[in-house]
């Protein structure tokens, strides 16, 4: 091989520029039953060569070139792939939903906001469950405002609606000060974060027999986010077409799936979603599909386990999940020390989602080179930052999200 060709391959491989589409794989053996303890790779040099499945090439080989084909053919195909292979399908069990505003305090945050507590009760198969949604709207607003909904995957004190405890994880005062409404719910209200055989939470209400395609806990939380949205779009203080969903880590995987499955979410802010969320699995850097399914067997559907230690069989990668948000605004955020979540893999996934955005408009382009720490890139409807420090959701992240929302939601 001549030198120039060799150099081209070395430069192109990390970005997966030699992309190709793969057929759906044969079901490989369930590697979870074998004891695999491969060391986790944190070395960029050891990232294997990989071929990213092509975002715009349909299963039948047809290459999508326009937004109509994307919306009618390729996007539904990818949505189905992520439904059957990663997150699982929501059962069609009928249920009743009642929404009740149980408390209103027009003088919250020393008069800066109005607090509403909303109970969303779901009844099915003689069982019931209530999701408590907390919402602050800014009192100084003269018209309906954009809103942020946080899927809280941490202890409820992080979203303390009484504001006795304040946490950067949900900096409600700062969000209100910038003119946004801010809402949150505890994901445990929807489904416990436990491998409980899907007996409890919303699975206990809606499941009627399970298969390898049945929904896992992340899909359940995303479903819960949509039930919160059912209320938020009716609140007269909120602009119903300007509601962003925000999540951190497992909550960010959830936010991505909520945005993918519910187009009413006008923006997704995905903070450090990592494996199964915003980072490319084919890089096998940090957490792997095998590890995540071993440690959290309840998060995804059964089929996802087949790809553990078997990434080459993947007919998709996470750039395709990000592309399901297109053309809506999408913010992907990483943290410098969060190597488990593979920051570079997160940036590359976003970079490779760009072709879907380009079917709609060309302003959303991203540089090939990852931006420096604490230097957000905002480009049309796409944004990215890598914050200094550890795996966490901090005020700094929220401020960057709000800078983006100022452009893509408020000014819209
Ligand atoms: C880790 C998990 C990650 C991420 C994280 C979190 O243990 O391996 O995928 O979701 O938890 O949610 O904080």
Image: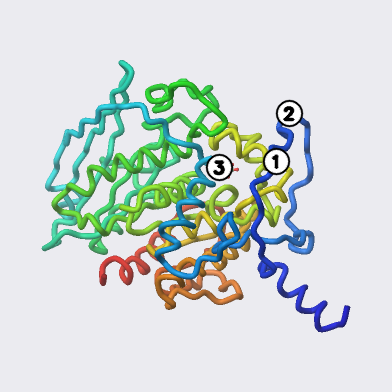
**Is the residue 211 above or below the residue 57 in the image?**
above
Horizontal side of 73 relative to 227 (left or right) equals right
Mark 1 / mark 2, whichever is N-terminal: 1
Q: Which disc is residue 26 wearing?
A: 1
How many numbered circles are shown?
3
Q: Residue at x 68, y 55 (%)?
A: 282
Tell whether label 2 touches label 3 (CB within 8 Å): no
Q: Position of residue 350 (x, y in %)?
A: 53, 64
Label 1 packing within 10 angstroms: few (<14), some (14-19), many (20+): few
Q: Are marks 3 and 1 in contact (CB under 8 Å)?
A: no
Quadrant position of the N terminus in the picture? bottom right
Question: Residue 265's x, y, as percent?
Answer: 33, 53
- Decide which of tag 3 and tag 1 comes sooner along the chain: 1
Task: Say the numbered circle drawn on residue 167.
Answer: none
Q: Residues within 10 Å of mark 3 (few under 14, many from 20)?
A: many
- Earlier-in-chain disc, 3 versus 2: 2
Mark 3 C-beta to ligand 1 under 8 Å: no
Name the quarter where the C terminus is drawn. bottom left
Q: For residue 279, what is the image quadrant?
A: bottom right
Judge from the rendering whether residue 178 lies leftward or rightward of residue 1; answer left or right. left
Q: Is residue 128 left or right of residue 216?
A: left
Q: Does dot 3 land on a helix, a strand or a loop?
A: helix
Point out residue 114 in the picture as x, y percentages from the top left corner.
16, 49
Dividing the image into four equal quarters, which quarter contains ligand 1? Answer: top right
In the image, what residue occupies the spot 71% across and 73% down?
12
Residue 86's mark? Answer: 3
- Which residue lies under the disc numbered 2? 33
- Name the one closer to the observer, 130 or 310: 310
- Quick check: 285 above or below 306? below
Comparing labels 3 and 1, the label whose residue is closer to the camera: 1
């Amino acid at each position: 091989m001549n030198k120039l060709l060799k150099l081209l391959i070395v430069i192109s491989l990390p970005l997966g520029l030699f992309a190709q589409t793969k057929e759906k794989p044969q079901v490989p053996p369930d590697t979870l039953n074998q004891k695999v303890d491969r060391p986790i790779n944190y070395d960029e040099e050891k990232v294997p060569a990989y071929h990213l499945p092509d975002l715009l090439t349909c299963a039948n080989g047809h290459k999508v070139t326009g937004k109509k084909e994307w919306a009618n053919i390729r996007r539904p195909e990818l949505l189905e792939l992520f439904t059957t292979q990663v997150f699982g399908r929501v059962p069609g069990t009928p249920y009743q939903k009642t929404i009740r505003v149980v408390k209103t305090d027009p003088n919250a945050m020393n008069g800066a906001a109005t607090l509403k507590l909303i109970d969303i009760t779901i009844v099915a198969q003689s069982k019931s469950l209530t999701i408590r949604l907390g919402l602050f709207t800014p009192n100084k607003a003269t018209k309906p405002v954009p809103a942020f909904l946080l899927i809280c995957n941490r202890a409820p004190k992080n979203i303390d609606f009484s504001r006795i405890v304040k946490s950067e994880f949900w900096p409600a005062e700062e969000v209100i000060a910038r003119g946004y409404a801010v809402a949150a719910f505890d994901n445990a209200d929807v489904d416990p974060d436990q491998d409980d055989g899907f007996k409890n939470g919303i699975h206990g209400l809606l499941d009627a027999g399970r298969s390898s395609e049945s929904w896992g806990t992340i899909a359940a939380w995303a479903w819960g986010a949509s039930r919160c949205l059912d209320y938020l779009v009716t609140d007269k203080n909120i602009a119903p077409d300007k509601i962003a969903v925000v999540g951190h880590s497992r909550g960010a995987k959830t936010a991505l799936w909520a945005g993918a499955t519910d187009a009413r979410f006008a923006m997704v802010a995905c903070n450090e979603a990592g494996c199964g969320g915003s980072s490319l699995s084919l890089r096998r850097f940090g957490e792997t599909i095998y590890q995540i399914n071993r440690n959290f067997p309840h998060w995804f559907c059964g089929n996802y386990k087949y790809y553990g230690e078997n990434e080459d069989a993947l007919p998709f990668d996470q750039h395709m999940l990000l592309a399901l948000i297109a053309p809506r605004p999408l913010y992907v955020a990483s943290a410098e020390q969060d190597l488990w979540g593979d920051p570079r893999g997160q940036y590359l996934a976003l970079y490779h989602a760009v072709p879907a955005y380009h079917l709609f408009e060309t302003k959303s382009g991203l540089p090939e080179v990852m931006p420096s720490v604490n230097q957000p890139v905002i480009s049309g409807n796409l944004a990215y930052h890598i914050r200094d420090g550890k795996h966490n959701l901090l005020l700094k992240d929220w401020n960057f999200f709000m800078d983006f929302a100022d452009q893509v939601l408020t000014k819209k």
